[in-house]
Image (spheres, grey):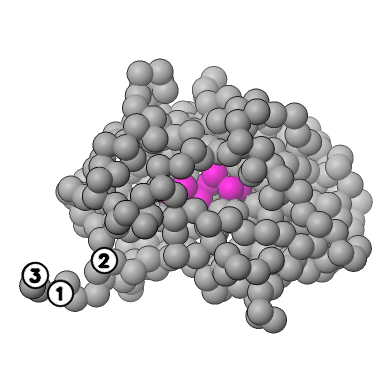
Amino acid sequence: MKEAVQDLLSILELERIEDNIFRGQGRASGQRAIFGGLVAAQALMAASRTVPAERPVHSLHAYFLRPGDFSVPIIYDVERIRDGKSFTTRRVRAIQHGRAIFSLAASFQVEEEGVNHQADMPEVPGPEGLPTDREQRQAFAHRIPEQFREAFLSERPVEVRAIRPANPFEAEPQEPVRQAWFRLADRAEMDEATRRAILAFASDFGLLGTAMLPHGVNFFQPHVQSASIDHTMWFHGSFEPHEWLLYHCHSPFAGGARGLNFGSIYRADGTLVASTAQEGLVRLRPEEPPA
């Protein structure tokens, strides 16, 4: 198994301190703070470990409250809100330095039959032949400050192939739609709770950036301040993380220094397996004149 995949699986296996209290570790990823998708995945794992395995998560609603600190563990405090006949509800606080950095509410349900319909998957090129995200990063790595370059080029647990890859240093306005194939970079044995936590981890990739596309700005520009504010996810069906999934994202609105984004995740056969929504901070500071 690839080291990056093994590392992700290991940090999703939280240490249980008490019945409802877990401890997790962060990982440096070249960002200023712990990647929000990792905190969401760990919080979901903490909640899932207090729920019977036959009740998988069907939705989560989360808020990013403060940046995470790489240097200390994260404590996950799970509150058992309700255990009903069909549904189970949990609330989780992620804590560092005595303060909440993240909160999550998740609902779990026994599997049931019911009516079925779904939106069709967009017609897009398949992942074969598209450049990998690592190839894209290597193409402009020379523009990354040297102290961040190694982390920027390091192997990642999730492989991403964008339908319309772009150079972030030459951003131009385009329609607020982002489409990319992604998959876990190696096959691994795991339970359903871990599968869904990995999907939560990957669902934070590129979602906020969709709202920036019409304005020709992105995370790499020093005058752009951005951060996820909240994140919602609904799980619809089964999938294998190591098989290709299509992430179709679109942004219907940006304003008030915030951008709103929606996403749909499909299996390669067209089955819709999850939906996402996220609002994030998109604040533009005055650009400094060249020296």
**Range of magenta residues:** 200-206
Residue 38: x and y in percent read: 60, 54
Q: Nearer the viewer, residue 144 or 282?
A: 144
Marks 3/2: CA–CA distance: 13 Å
Marks 1/2: CA–CA distance: 9 Å
Left or right of residue 95, residue 123 in this image: left
Among numbered discs 3 and 2, the one appearing first in the sequence: 2
26 falls in the magenta region: no
Residue 90: x and y in percent read: 78, 62
Residue drawn at x 33%, y 40% as measured from the top left: 137
Among numbered discs 1 and 2, the one appearing first in the sequence: 2
Q: Are marks 1 and 3 in contact (CB under 8 Å)?
A: yes
Residue drawn at x 56%, y 73% as measured from the top left: 65
Q: Which residue is mark 1?
A: 288
Left or right of residue 253, residue 15 in this image: right
Left or right of residue 158, residue 188 in this image: right
Q: Quadrant of residue 273?
A: top right
Of the numbered discs in the image, which one, if any, rests on residue 222? 2
Q: Residue furthest bottom?
A: 98
In this view, 109 is above or below 240: below
- Is the C terminus in the top left, top right, bottom left or bottom right quadrant? bottom left
In this view, 219 is above or below 186: below
Determine crowd level at label 1: few under 14, some 14-19, many 20+ residues with C-alpha closer than 10 A. Answer: few
Residue 229: x and y in percent read: 49, 67
In this view, 271 is above or below 55: above
Q: Amino acid at mark 1?
A: Glu
Residue drawn at x 60%, y 68% as measured from the top left: 71
